[in-house]
Amino acid sequence: MTIATLIDKQDTAEIIRDQIAALLALETAAQVKLANTAGKSTPSEWKFRVFQERANPWEEVPGVPIVNVWWDNSTFDGAASNIVERQKSSTIYNLDCYGYGRSSDNPAGGHHCGDQSAAEEAQKAVRLVRNILMSAEYTYLGLRGTVWRRWIDSISIFQPQQDNQNVQHVVVARLAFRVEFNEYSPQVVAETLDLLTVDVLRTEDGEIVVEADYDYTA
């Protein structure tokens, strides 16, 4: 017997990844507007670009921090699940916040180091991302009834590599974001029973034990 229905859906893990990316894109635009309203001299300080499932997002035009949202791994809790329909998942999404820095002359003397600027840009982006996703407004990431819990596992800083070498003047702050939710699998589709036929069973001495047909058509 094969599955009766076409598996034509996204898993919950994919839906949540897309939701995280959408919320970040929405909120960075909203923060820029709030910075304008507050009279900040550089509202662009609250701007970052959002991508998902990209391998080398720093190849985009530099100048604005980049956040890349990607699904890292999922584990499943058998004790909180059932073997038929529902599997409780704990999934890690990595939110890689890329900062790009340029070296420049300092009017007061010396110069601004590009690697330092890159680190500060990455840290600024991860600060915004953490505050957005852990805000009270997004306790359930806008998916109440689907998301059980969201939490930050860790934040780590590193330089991305290309061809086994560090990428110049690019620093990444990786926020490991854990979300707990249910995944669901296809179920048996009930069918209307028209006729039930019971097989004939015989004992060793040949006696008929059961023999019956039940017609359910009306």
Image: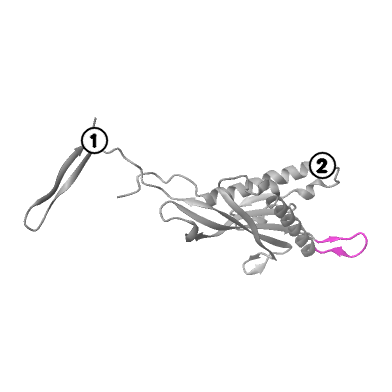
Category of crowding for the residue at label 1, using alpha-carbon neighbours closer than 10 angstroms: few (below 14), some (14–19), many (at least 20)? few
Residue at coordinates 77% horizontally, 44% vertically from top-left? 32
Above or below, 28 relative to 154: above
Q: Quadrant of the C terminus?
A: top left
Is residue 26 covered in magenta? Answer: no
29 or 182, which lies in front? 182
Q: Is residue 89 left or right of residue 175?
A: left
Which numbered disc flags the more N-terminal residue, 2 or 1? 2
41 or 17, which lies in front? 17
The circle on residue 216 is: 1
132 or 161, which lies in front? 132
Q: Name the residue under label 2.
A: 36
**Element at label 2:** helix
The circle on residue 47 is: none
Q: Is residue 161 left or right of residue 63?
A: left
Q: Main secondary structure of the magenta part?
A: loop
**Rendered location of residue 103, percent (x, y):** 81, 61
Q: Disc 2 residue type?
A: Asn
Outermost residue to the top: 218
**Rendered location of residue 212, percent (x, y):** 16, 43
Q: How far apart are marks 2 and 1 (CA)?
A: 71 Å
Residue at coordinates 70% horizontally, 58% vertically from top-left? 98
Residue at coordinates 81% horizontally, 64% vertically from top-left? 113
Region rendered in magenta: 103-113
**Rendered location of residue 78, percent (x, y):** 47, 60
1 or 18, which lies in front? 1
The answer to whether the residues at label 2 and label 1 have Cβ atoms under 8 Å apart is no
**Element at label 1:** loop
Q: Disc 1 residue type?
A: Tyr
